[in-house]
């Protein structure tokens, strides 16, 4: 499944660092849960690295994270933070882990699972960003609730999950949970905001309060 990185041009020039990778999990648990639609590239690659690292450790001769850290010339807390989704390892750390475990940790070919959609000046994705030949299913009953419609209206106005959560006084994970039934009703993969937006733009449910 191809996933979308929703990027505002110049995203790499940030006033503040990205939030912790694990904080972007919308459903499930780190590192196997689904990330929210506004998860930055760092969260996606951190999740892939964590999965690879966990698999490498489980199939290695080392019996603990501490042993892996020692063999890699790192501290135990550093390895623990990576596995917990509390940070993205730098190139040096990643290289040392690969040497210590004698296996690849960087997910080769990971880029093949993504495409970039630019969002200009905080606006919503453009219609031509939708994959051709793909349209949401037509549900036989309302797919939304009052709460999810409020979220969808704000998304259509260009607000991110984080901005919506702040406006509604809740958490970004709650936004993901409220949208989960909508994705299911439409037969969409969680996080497929492009096809969700296409359906919402033409749905009569927009007229409900």
Image (cartoon, rainbow, N blue to C red):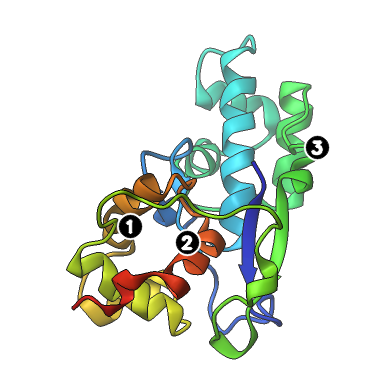
Q: Dividing the picture into quarters, in which one does residue 72 lie?
A: top right
Of discs 3 and 1, which sits in the foreground? 1
**Residue drawn 60% across and 51% down?**
44
Instruction: Indicate the position of residue 142 as horizontal and vertical percent values.
Output: 25, 57
Answer above or below: position of 38 versus 154: above
**Residue drawn 48% across and 44% down?**
81
Instruction: Specify the farthest residue to the bottom.
Output: 121
Q: According to the image, label 2 marks what residue? A: 196
Of discs 2 and 1, which sits in the foreground? 2
Distance of mark 3 from mark 1, alpha carbons? 32 Å
Answer above or below: position of 40 versus 103: below
Instruction: Indicate the position of residue 98 as horizontal and vertical percent values.
Output: 76, 31
Q: Dots 2 and 3: beta carbons under 8 Å?
A: no
Q: Dots 2 and 1: beta carbons under 8 Å?
A: yes
- N-terminal of the pair, mark 3 or mark 1, is 3
Question: What label does residue 108 carry, if any?
Answer: 3
Whether residue 143 appears in this view of the structure is: yes
Q: Residues within 10 Å of mark 3 (few under 14, many from 20)?
A: few
Closer-to-camera residue (84/148): 148
**Residue drawn 41% across and 50% down?**
186
Image quadrant occupied by the C terminus: bottom left
Relative to residue 114, is residue 6 drawn left or right? left
Dot 3: element: loop
Dot 2: element: helix
Q: According to the image, label 1 marks what residue? A: 179
Instruction: Indicate the position of residue 158 as horizontal and vertical percent values.
Output: 48, 82
Of discs 2 and 3, which sits in the foreground? 2
Distance of mark 2 from mark 3, alpha carbons? 30 Å
Closer-to-camera residue (167/108): 167
Dot 1: element: helix
- N-terminal of the pair, mark 2 or mark 3, is 3
């Amino acid at each position: 499944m191809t996933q979308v990185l929703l990027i505002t041009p110049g995203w790499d020039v940030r006033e503040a660092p990205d939030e912790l990778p694990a904080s972007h999990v919308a459903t499930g648990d780190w590192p196997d849960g689904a990330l929210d639609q506004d998860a930055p590239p760092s969260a996606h690659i951190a999740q892939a690295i964590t999965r690879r690292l966990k698999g490498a450790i489980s199939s290695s001769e080392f019996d603990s994270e501490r042993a892996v850290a020692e063999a890699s010339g790192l501290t135990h807390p550093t390895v623990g933070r990576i596995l917990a989704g509390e940070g993205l390892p730098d190139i040096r750390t990643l290289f040392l882990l690969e040497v210590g475990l004698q296996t690849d940790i960087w997910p080769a070919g990971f880029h093949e699972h993504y495409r970039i959609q630019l969002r200009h000046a905080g606006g919503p994705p453009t219609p031509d960003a939708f994959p051709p030949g793909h349209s949401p299913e037509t549900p036989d009953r309302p797919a939304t609730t009052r709460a999810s419609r409020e979220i969808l209206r704000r998304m259509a106005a260009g607000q991110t999950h984080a901005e919506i959560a702040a406006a509604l006084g809740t958490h970004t994970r709650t936004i993901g949970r409220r949208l989960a039934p909508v994705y299911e009703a439409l037969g969409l993969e969680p996080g497929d905001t492009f096809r969700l937006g296409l359906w919402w733009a033409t749905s009569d449910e927009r007229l409900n309060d």
